[in-house]
Amino acid sequence: MDAYTTNEPIYALATAYAPSAIAIVRLSGDGVIDLLSSVFDRPEKLKRAKTNTLVYGNLIDKQNSIVDEVLVAVFKKGHGYTGEEALEINAHGSLTGLKRIFLLLESIGIRQAKRGEFTFRAFMHGRLDLTQAEAVEELISSKSIRGQEAALERLEGGLKNRLLAIKNKLINILASLEVQLDYAEDEILEDWIMPKAEINEIISNLDEIVKTYSAGTIYREGAKIVLAGAANAGKSSLFNLLTKENRAIVSPIAGTTRDYIESFTTIHDIPVRLFDTAGLRDSDDLIESEGIKRSEKLINEADLVLLLLAPGEKEEITWKTKTIVVKTKSDLEKGEGLAISTVNGEGISLLLDSIYQELSSKSSESELGAISIDSERQRDGLVRLVEMLKFILSNENESVDILALFFQSALSILGEITGEVTNEELLDTLFSNFCLGK
């Protein structure tokens, strides 16, 4: 593999590259403790340090000048994040000081790590399977408490253990088939019977995991909510109120919003991408007409649409996306149903509750509890596995040797999901999306 290796020591800044009180530089690789000892003013103390301990001292250059005063966390082989010998240098967060540390490390043969290289090594050394490795990046990029909790559950091995249980069941079925293959036909006492109930149970379990992907998408990327309605229905006023910003232009002149505006917010801990759109109406203005087309496209792609109706306007829904009808300007005229006013705040709390209920039902947890998936790669693999198992059930009358090949294929698909069966291109793509220091 060109992008990543495991035979040389690496380093990377694990904290933000910005002035700060403390900065952490991670090091990993065989012999890295001896290498750093050569530029540490207490070399023997560092070499003799027990794993999971801190050593205080100074980093020094070839002229014996102090580069920085540091605390070094020591992780002997098998104890650190990567499974390799590893160190974490707690330095002062000076950008100039960090540059000097980087140059010092490179001068003793420690190269800068590539994106995701630490997690790649953890995967290669068996510290994490591929579902846990993906959970690392999902944890870093989570936009809500619930999303973070789900990523932590995957990182702790919740999904891994669930898939391992499925793997063991498939192995047991395959083993019963291979027993048949080990004996001559006239020595077998009875025909092999397809364990339909057990396979259907596995399929049901996999389907439940697949269903959690939509929830993972919402908590990873944010639910897409579109404010739709006629010109002057109050969309921009509601957009500004929900985002607590004054981004959308509010004007009594119809057609003020020509293109959509997007902003990020949260509603009861669900991350939301909120879109203010051009008013839906017939227009001879080419720019406004293009904005309306874009609004219609957004509506069809949304997780939820808020259709805003000003007093006197009639409800007309021409799309299939889940929609909440909101009567606006209730301070001027009270409408039936869910009515709000962005002037006095009437109905806003009820609207937020309604949005949360709709998004919660879309992303409700299954019987698996906190176990969910947040990876398109995992979702696609699980769907393929379900299809393979259904294919096996539909071919139960095949010979035992053919059925054994089918179950081996199912196990291979499962291995691709967990990383037991993989290829260099997949690993390059997956880990290159990580941040430096991970």
Image: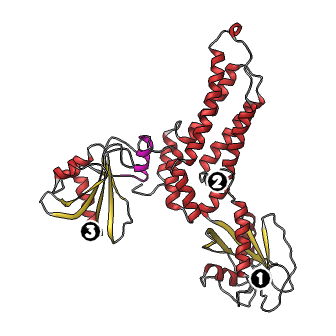
Q: Is residue 290 visible?
A: no
- Residue 231, disc: 1
Q: Dividing the picture into quarters, in which one does residue 382 lie? A: top right
Contact check, label 1 and label 3, Cβ < 8 Å:
no
Q: Does residue 66 appear left or right of residue 179 in this picture?
A: left
Stretch of the chain drawn in magenta: 113-125
Q: Amino acid at mark 2?
A: Gly
- Which numbered marker is on residue 96? 3
Q: Which residue is mark 2?
A: 369
What amino acid is found at the position of numbered circle 3 in the picture? Thr
State left or right for residue 43 relative to residue 399. Answer: left
**Quarter where residue 313 is shown:** bottom right
Could one spot residue 246 in this view of the protein?
Answer: yes
Query: Does residue 424 show up magenta in the picture?
Result: no
Secondary element under disc 1, as helix, strand or loop, is: loop
Quote the CA–CA distance across marks 3 and 2. Answer: 48 Å
